[in-house]
Amino acid sequence: MFKGYKDLPVVPMTWDTTMVNMTGGWRTYKPILDPEKCNKCYICWKFCPEAAIDVDDELKEVPIIDYDHCKGCAICANECPKEAIEMVDESIED
Amino acid sequence: MIEIRFHGRGGQGAVVASNLLAMAAFREGKDVQAFPYFGVERRGAPVTAFTKIDDRPVRIKSMIYEPDHVIVMDSSLLKAVDVTQGLKNEGVILINTDKKPGDIQGVKGKIATVDATAIAVKHGLGSKEAPIVNTAILGAFAKATGIVKIESLVESILDSAPAKKNENAKAAKEAYENVLIGGE
Amino acid sequence: MVKKVITGNYASSYGAKLAKAQVIAAYPITPQTSVVEKIAEFVASGEMEAQYIKVESEHSAMAACITASQTGARTFTATSAHGLTLMHEMLIWASGARTPVVMTNVNRAMAPPWSVWADHLDSVAQRDTGWIQYYCESNQEVLDTIIMAYKVGESRDVLLPSFLTLDAFYLSHTYETVDIPEQDEVDEFLPRFDPPYKFDVEDPHLFGSLSFPHQFYMEWRYQISLSMAKAREKILEIEAEFKKTFGRSHGGLLDEYRCDDAEVVLIAAGTMASTIREVIDQYRDNGEKVGLARLRVFRPFPVNEVRELAKRAKVIGVLDRSYSFGYGGAFFAETAGALYNSPDEPVIKNYVVGIGGRDVTPSTVSGILDNALSLKEKGLDREIEWIELKEGGD
């Protein structure tokens, strides 16, 4: 990593991408997807502002939530037409 | 250095005239500078523009206070503006009017006149109410002062007039032939 | 090479075209408008291969230029006065992001009262934004400086934005003779913009994000200061190269005219310098040892050149076409500042002149020179003097 001005790139930037920036720790409510209720419309994937919801290339499986980066904004839960995503308080989750 | 000051009204083409004159002198190997005294541009408002011509680089970048020659594109400006302010004694004052130089009263300098309005209207430059007289008056200026050749002026007009290049060139030539020079 | 009689604004447009600017984002303002109108014509006719982005403000114009530059595109914009000051936030962003945008600023007074005429306050007020600032004296210099500014700004050890300034109307709307170089010559002189880092989906990075106090914000600022210092050498080096290719140069950072044995030197920027040359010649004909040092580059400030000048001159008169309320003109304050830690102590006086487009005539310059010459014997009369100020009050 950088130590001082002599190692810094001239442009203020990180060497890495935002993948190393684990924003999952900011979360107080965690989205839990119920695969039984999910109809695979992928609206949650479309709306996620952090690109923390992933879908498979074949579009066959239910979406996968990336908890390393999900900030718990609950937009997915709000948008889900099947109410298949529930926001659960992290502090009382077992 | 030869310094020429133009007095016109917004819409008559004084600024373009100052530039076309500079381009004509440039064609004859001179260094030139042309610029307007920029106000808030409105049609009909008095406009002043300047041309400087020299054999060596023109370096002074300020307005002209003691012109060698003055061009008045609208004779009504004779009452509204002190057009001869600072005019050098031997300088020509060229006025757009249908009068003869001898009929112009109370103006100093060597008076020349040309009916640039009639010439512009004849060649369809602008409208009858608001003719664009700039190229006609430049043709007359070429004859009255000999500062640029009519050929250089016509080339500049054909090259750089914003519209109706041929008509403008014809207007300049006609004015060149018809300018009246006081004392001749 | 073609010689044309064009305005300073058109010289800017031709400069941007010859430099092959790829993205232009601009908002019109008097007296800058014809710069970007002409470029719009070039783009519309296909003479210039560029994206022309119409924006809703100067702030957005600069934001668009910065972002385009971060993708690796060469970018250009132009503005004036209120437009430049509206950009202020984005100007600092541009240097911080190290985007070598080039911009024409037509120097115009700031309201109120409204004035569209020449005054340097708009650009002088941007002195701390991290932009290289060139003050032009002629339309030829405008065109040439745009080409050089890209080469300086884009060099890897500089990577900073630059603007050049034209005095409103005295350059922007004045027709002068300009040599327009051939495209292939410019292409050879100015290679494609190749930034070390850019927005690239194949190589993603996080640009301009948060830096905590314990991290490297301070070090990135220090890097800008190093690059700005490097720009001093780079401007001289690239101008020498320009001269080799095009046969012209414009005097580096501090453009000296008849200064070698001058006892009295005027420091001035912009078009008034051209008028001063003429007057200096007249005084020289009368045996007076006077000279001009034209402040061509205000940022980076030519500290070394000013110190060299002070070894020779007994009196330095600094002409400011703007005023920093509370402490003299900025050119004066910086000149005096540059000399404080040097052993030479010429008399330094500030002449505030030409504010709001007030005409700086040969007689204005004579008045200043006469006063400056008198200081040789009698020493400083007053530190700051507003020239040709109308007093009234009777």
Image (tube, coloured by chain):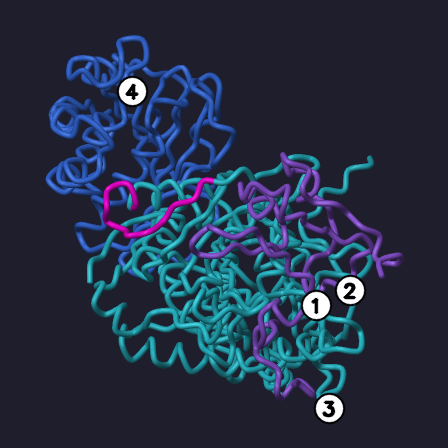
Chain colours: A purple, B blue, C cyan
Disc 3, disc 4: CB below 8 Å? no
Q: Residue at x 65, y 38 (%)?
A: A79
Disc 1, disc 3: CB below 8 Å? no
State the residue position of label 4. Answer: B96
Q: Nearer the viewer, mark 3 or mark 4?
A: 3
State the residue position of label 3. Answer: C343
Q: Residue at x 44, y 28 (%)?
A: B47
Residue C265 picture location, percent across and down: 59, 74
State the residue position of label 2. Answer: A25
Q: Pointer 3: residues within 10 angstroms few (<14), some, or many (20+)?
A: few
Disc 2, disc 1: CB below 8 Å? yes
Q: Nearer the viewer, mark 4 or mark 1?
A: 1
* Label 4 – label 2 distance at C-alpha: 83 Å
- Residue C8 falls left or right of residue C328: left
State the residue position of label 1. Answer: A22
Residue C244 picture location, percent across and down: 29, 80
- Residue C199 falls left or right of residue B67: right
Q: Amino acid at mark 1?
A: Met
Labels 1 and 3 share a subunit? no
Q: Secondary structure at mark 4?
A: strand
Quadrant in which the N terminus of chain C appears: bottom left
Quadrant in which the C terminus of chain C appears: top right
Q: Which residues are magenta?
A: C43-54
Residue C274 picture location, percent across and down: 46, 61
* Label 1 – label 3 distance at C-alpha: 57 Å
